[in-house]
Image: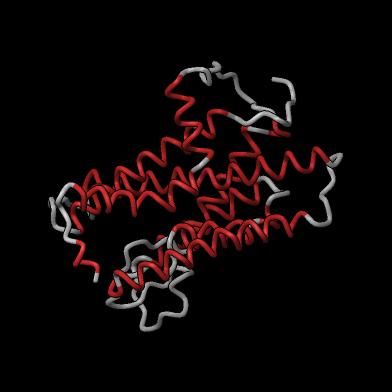
Amino acid sequence: MTLNLKERFWEVDSLRGLAIIMMVTFHLIFDLNYFGVYSFDLYSGFLFWFQKITAFIFIFLVGVSLSLSYSRTTILNDYKVPKNLFLKYLKRGLKIFFYGLLITLITWIFVKQEFIIFGILHLIGIAIILEYPFLKHKYVNLFAGLIFIAAGIYLTGFRFDFYGLLWLGFIPNNWGTLDYFPLLPWLGVVSLGIFAGKMIYKDYIRQFKLPDLSNYQIITLFEFLGRNSLVIYLIHQPILILLLYLLGYLNINYFF
């Protein structure tokens, strides 16, 4: 495959689009359970792993995309790192983290008992900033990713009497939230994505042969969803709740 810096890798966008569909599907099931429309077991079995796999794909692709973005930018600058490149990632990370704070505010207003303090958008925003020093490395990301994941898994076996480090993975006693993605272990998944991006798309060139399926309508749809994943994430829950209300499953007074 020849170098084409204007190209987007359709398989990356498509996989992200698939993850978005999986996420919306899970959140619909979650809403039906949360509002008492139907009862589902979300904490074990198929749905538990479905949610974890969905999150893993989505967050892993954050790392892959960071690797691709960094590679493309440095190649455009004759394999040199522009002086203001960190500012680009800082702005991007803060923007997504700000959207996370909006989710925090909205859930605090409507679901105070389980409002989101550090969900997936908070994680992605901070990860984009923290991973910047690792973007020039390859195997460092593999080792760091495995360490972060191992540390996060270890921490899940404990509960703590303080809240200040819940963003890192120190889970407080008797605490619940609708969405929780601490840096440990999930920053490790981003690191593995960066490593995979550098291995599979070295110098912005796909390192394996892949039939071009991008002209198929279903792939085109997945690509569209993948390219607009942030917007879809921000609007899908209000739309799902509105649909459930219009179908008569919800009483709007529930929220007030």
Which residue does the image show at 30% across and 74% down from the upper left?
112
Q: Is residue 100 above or below residue 40?
A: below
- Please provide percent x and percent y for residue 87: 74, 59
Q: Quadrant of residue 78?
A: top right
Rendering colour mode: secondary structure
From the viewer's perspective, tell me whether residue 195 is left or right of residue 14: right
Which residue does the image show at 42% across and 68% down from the upper left?
104
Q: Quadrant of the N terminus?
A: top right
Nearer-the-camera pick, 96 or 135: 96
From the viewer's perspective, tell me whether residue 137 is left or right of residue 182: right
Which residue does the image show at 21% across and 47% down from the upper left?
45
Q: Is residue 220 above or below residue 187?
A: above
Q: Is residue 41 above or below residue 202?
A: below
- Please provide percent x and percent y for residue 105: 42, 71
| Count of numbered badges drawn on the protein | 0
Q: Quadrant of residue 211?
A: top right
Nearer-the-camera pick, 134 or 70: 70
Which residue does the image show at 41% across and 80% down from the upper left?
163
Q: Quadrant of the C terminus?
A: bottom left
- Please provide percent x and percent y for residue 117: 42, 70
Q: Is residue 70 above or below residue 113?
A: above
